[in-house]
Image (cartoon, grey):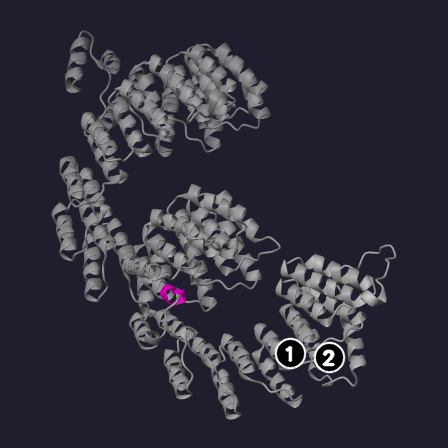
Amino acid sequence: MKQPSNKITTATATATTTSSSLSRLSSLFSSSRTLPPASPCRPRRLPPPSKSRLYTHFFCSLIRAHLTCGQLSDALGALRYMRSLGLRPSLRSWNLLLSRFNSAGFVAEVPGLYTELLHASVKPDSFTHNILVHALCKMGSLDDALCVLRSAGEIDAVSYNTVIWGFCDLGMPLTAAGLLSEMWKKGFQFDGTSCNILVKGLCRMGLLDVAESLVEMLVRDGITTNVIGFNTLIDGYCKVGKLDAANGLLKSMRMENVSPDIITCNTLIDGFCRIGDLSAARTVMEDIGASLEPNVVTHTIFISEYCKRGQLEEALVLYEDMVRTGISPDVVTYTSLINGLCNQGRLSEAYTLFREMEKMGIVPNHVSYCTLIDSLFKAGRARESCALLGEMVARGVVMDMVVYTATMDGLFKLGKVDEAEKVFQLICSPYINPNHIAYSALIDGRCKAGNMEAAESAFLEMQKKSLNANVLTYSSIINGYVKKLILSGALDVMKKMKETAIGPNVVTYGTLIDGIFKIGNQEEALRMYKEMIENGLEVNKFVVDCLVNGLRKNGKMEQAESLFREMEQKGVTMDCVNFTSLMDGFYKIGNTSAALNIGEELIRKNLVPDAVVYNVFINSLCVLGKSREAEYFLNEMKEKGLTPDHAAYNTLINAHCKEGRLGKALGLSKKMKSVGLVPNLITYNILVQGFSEVGDADKAVELLIEMAAGGSCPSSSAYRNALRACAKYKRADLIARIHEKIGNIGLGLNTNLYNMLIHALCKLGMTRRANSILDDMQGRGFKPDTITFNVLILGHCKSGHVDKAFDTYSQMLLEGISPNIATFNTLLGGLSATGRIGDADKLINEMKTWEVVPNNFTYDILITAHGKEGNRKDSMKLYCEMVMKGFVPKLSTYNLLISDFAGVGMMKQARELLNEMHQRGVSPNSATYDILISGWSKLLNGSEVKRLLKEMTERGFTPSKSTIGFISRAFARPGRKLGARKLLRKLYKI
């Protein structure tokens, strides 16, 4: 935007001659001419001189007709055609064209048209120059506007007022005030209009004292301030909250015999409403408005204020009165009511009113759309929000920063992170620059999605663009780190926040206190609370809840209650959430009577229990195994007019399932349906798990299919539970039914489900049927993955069909699917089970080719396989390699190695392995001791046998019958072996 230069402000006041002035103005705009030149055409027959006047009149009338119809291009064409005939358009025609181009918003065309006027040797008048100056000011070309003002011969007070307006509009009212002296020197009287323009400009910049001084100075010079000037000043004072000064001006108006109008009244009402003084606003209405007819603005201001206060019924009554008295609501009225309804969660009514607005012939603006879109997103109704966005675009309603930000924020809150990021990319287009609010919403969304790196990146980008982060931005980042339990990151942000002189607020401290408690550092959390108090911040109910929750979760219920009571005494008003947290704490430690006392106190304080409070009652009683008492609270909820939600029903259904009352649980799910509450994913998961655990696979599968048929996609856990039950009770028919029914419905079909079906069939040894499921999977366009083939390979190995397992492995490679460590371990296990460990070398080489590193299971399999074949040397070599790589062998591996050494009488090596077991934290079991005792018995080492028997007994193990036999055969006297065996069996109660 161009700013006036010093050379302009010191330029010569007037031109020496009119001709030189016109020449300079022509050169000024000739280079910036934007209108297309007249197209070349064939020589035209000129009208006879006698009819020139008639033709001129005709063309001027034609130009006016085109302009009246808004056909600017045709009007300009007629003027140029007229000139090509040698006819001279009147100045009035030129002025009309200039005026229409300017008023239609084609301000950039005005200078070019003005140049054509000069080239046509038409002398412009003050009206012409006023239009030109106005267009230049609207374009921000104040240098050029000043040049016209000081060079053109024909100018008047309007010309100066227009340039003064231009400076004020660009936020330079003090520069504009300097033109008053120039205006006076040129002999133009400034009037109330000049004053009003300047006063408005000064008020917009907050220079109210300067504005009032200017008014006083002009009044002294005999210029009377009219109602517009007073209204402008009153509006300025109202906007900065100086209502006493605004009232003072009202008195001045009356003293100067200037009658307040409805604008004065509305301005004062709006001012009092801005500071929340509704009573004073009503007084203004009674005082000034008594003699004036309230208009749509008056009613809208009151409606808006009622909506802000949550007094929606009063707002709706006023709206009805307004319509009844014949005042038509405008878009602002409707938008205020829609906003009020949305704030109270009455979205259906808000949407109805939105559509009523259209029926009344009022076109919703971007604010109306934004209000409804934002509220629908917050309510989780993304589909309706997106439909309204599409409607906005289709109707050509301008999407501004507010709409984009609301959409992005809504998508983030619904977890649609990718879509939200795409909206931000739209905000970053060449035509829109994201502001600090948009960045704050982006940072908050990324933090809630757990993407702290991207949030920090956005924060740095924000700083590079010199957009100031506020306490909310910092609090979002702190909250993000706290949720990820990265306390160091949260504290670093807090430190940066303080360095930039932005003081943490109660929410910031509350978030940090909550996070510190969650990582179990109670001392640091209480220190942070102390710091908050020292910084002069008042504790609110949010902080109290963080402290109470933190203390109760750390088992400090006495301290939690003590702090709660202390805060009550200090005047902190507690709500249902605070009492619910305390009550829940008492329930969790089993102090039911204290919890019920808190509940009674809640009711005594007229804090009506909501669904959340009842859910705590129900959940806590169910945890304590008192589901019957919990159901009493469910019924009480209904009696109190509260509708139990999914959480209440699901908690009770889960409790009944855990207590084995499956019929009762199923009955509750039917009750849900009877009250219009459709069982959700959690309900079905609980029921499927419940019936699966008691072995009722038929019912579990029935519920699974019912769930899918109702449009709810069963979760992986629901499928897993049902299929596990089918496999456990060998119900291949039910597995086939799940495959058939879910396949027909088509809901929830994915690779994961197919893998579970294949796994269930492989557990039953039905690998052929499992392969048919694989064929169906590929036929439906689902690509098998590593898990699919691993499950099939495992099935073949468990059935003893190792060659088929290797065929499946080959198929896996042919389809371009990479094997993992589980693939190789399963194949090695198959070779081991069938005594073909000699073929393992080739497979191990393939592992190296695929860069798959062996894990502890690989070594366990190989050691076990070589041990079974008596290949002690390879077993020990693999064992040493295994422990050197930091892997810990499992108990069975140790037992096999110990058994191998004991079998050949190498008991010292066996003992060494036992010691290594202890060192690596692997506890020996009964079999370990049996092997060692039997081995030492064979060597007749009584002291070792006694020591091991003692250790075995201390660990709670009993020797097996075969071990007793070994001891008796080794140590009993000849002829007393049977008696010794009986004695040992009696001793060890075998």
Q: Residue furthest front?
A: 50
Q: 460 or 12, which lies in front?
A: 12
Task: Kindly identify the residue that appears in the image at 50 percent across and 10 percent down.
Answer: 803
Q: Earlier in the sequence, mark 2 or mark 1?
A: 2
Kind of residue sitting beneath label 2: Ala
Residue 10 horizontal/vertical position (percent): 71, 84
Q: Nearer the viewer, residue 921 or 494?
A: 494
Up-down relation of residue 282 to residue 895 (above or below): below
Viewer-nearest residue: 279 or 664: 279
Q: Amino acid at mark 1?
A: Ser
Q: Residues within 10 Å of mark 2 (few under 14, many from 20)?
A: many
377 in relation to 83, above or below: above
Q: Is residue 960 left or right of residue 142?
A: left
Q: Quadrant of residue 960?
A: top left
Q: Position of residue 843 (x, y in %)?
A: 54, 18
Q: Count every numbered label the image shows and give the total.
A: 2
Magenta-drawn segment = 296-300
Residue pointed to by mark 1: 159
Please provide percent x and percent y for residue 374: 42, 51
Identity of the residue furthest to the top in this view: 975
Confirm or deny contact between disc 2 and disc 1 (CB under 8 A).
yes
- Circle 2 — which element? loop
User: Which residue is tagged 2?
Assistant: 152
